[in-house]
Amino acid sequence: MAGPLIQITPVGPAPQRRSVLSRRIRLLVAATMTYNVIEAIVAITAGTIASSTALIGFGLDSVIEVSSAAAVAWQFAGKDPERREKTALRIIAVSFFALAAYVTTESVRALISGAQAEHSSVGLVLAALSLAIMPGLSYAQRRAGRELGSRSAVADSKQTLLCTYLSAVLLVGLAVNSLFGWSWADPIAALVIAAVAVKEGREAWRGDTCCAVPLTGTAAQPAAAPQDEADACGCGPGCSCCPGEQP
């Protein structure tokens, strides 16, 4: 005798909701790219004028944010975004590593040579502006990415969040150099930028950006974490990927 039929609950958002989230992510990515293009031009120009490694590194991070956002835009432009996710994550990770390598080299060179960065009013204003704008963009994209179950969208939102941290580091470095004439503060701030970039790059390469629920079909089940370590969504410790959960 055949057993009772078991109704399987679909995993992940409904198709209509997925379409809304995908469109929202594309719009947020476009906004992030536009802002970062402007930010990169201003930061690199001002950094070159002031001989500021930290400011140039901040500008290059903006360039990398554009490439990261472009990778996510490319992913969601396809009919099957999940198939492109791994490639998008690799692009994001390599971008982080490239930034870290350049900034580290230039920072060490500046420390050894004793090169002194000059005061940059433009840099201070730019850092403060980014510190105000980037958290909102990052939060909105991270929330949509988690609900959709997109690791690449979450990784790109972390790249945007990194810009917030870097803005704070840059602001402190430039301010200390301007107020007290401590020229070493600029390359030290740049080294902090490089260290954070390496950490984020490693996580993006491994895909440790969100404990996403598979969205391959109605019979799909969450990747099971050990019972004593998983939360209500099947996420491991330290993860916060449940739909609607606050970061």
Image (cartoon, helix red, strand yellow):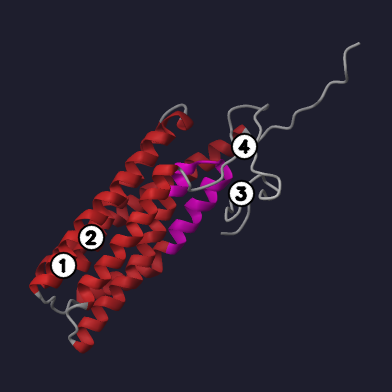
Front position in the image: 108 or 242: 108
The answer to whether marks 2 and 4 mark residues whose Cβ atoms lie closer than 8 Å is no
Residue 51 can be seen in this image: no
Disc number at residue 236?
Answer: 3
The image shows residue 56, relative to residue 234, as above or below, that is below
Q: CA distance from mark 4 to mark 3?
A: 10 Å
Front position in the image: 12 or 204: 204
Rate crowding at label 1 as few (under 14), some (14 to 19) or many (20 or more) other CA atoms within 10 Å: many
For mark 2, what is the residue? 59
Q: Amino acid at mark 4?
A: Ala
Q: CA distance from mark 1 to mark 4?
A: 46 Å
Disc number at residue 223?
Answer: 4
Majority SS type along the magenta span? helix
In this rendering, which labeled residue sits more in front, label 2 or label 4?
Answer: 4
The answer to whether marks 3 and 1 mark residues whose Cβ atoms lie closer than 8 Å is no
Measuring 31% from the left and 57% from the top, which residue is drawn there? 35
The answer to whether marks 1 and 2 mark residues whose Cβ atoms lie closer than 8 Å is yes
Q: CA distance from mark 3 to mark 1?
A: 42 Å
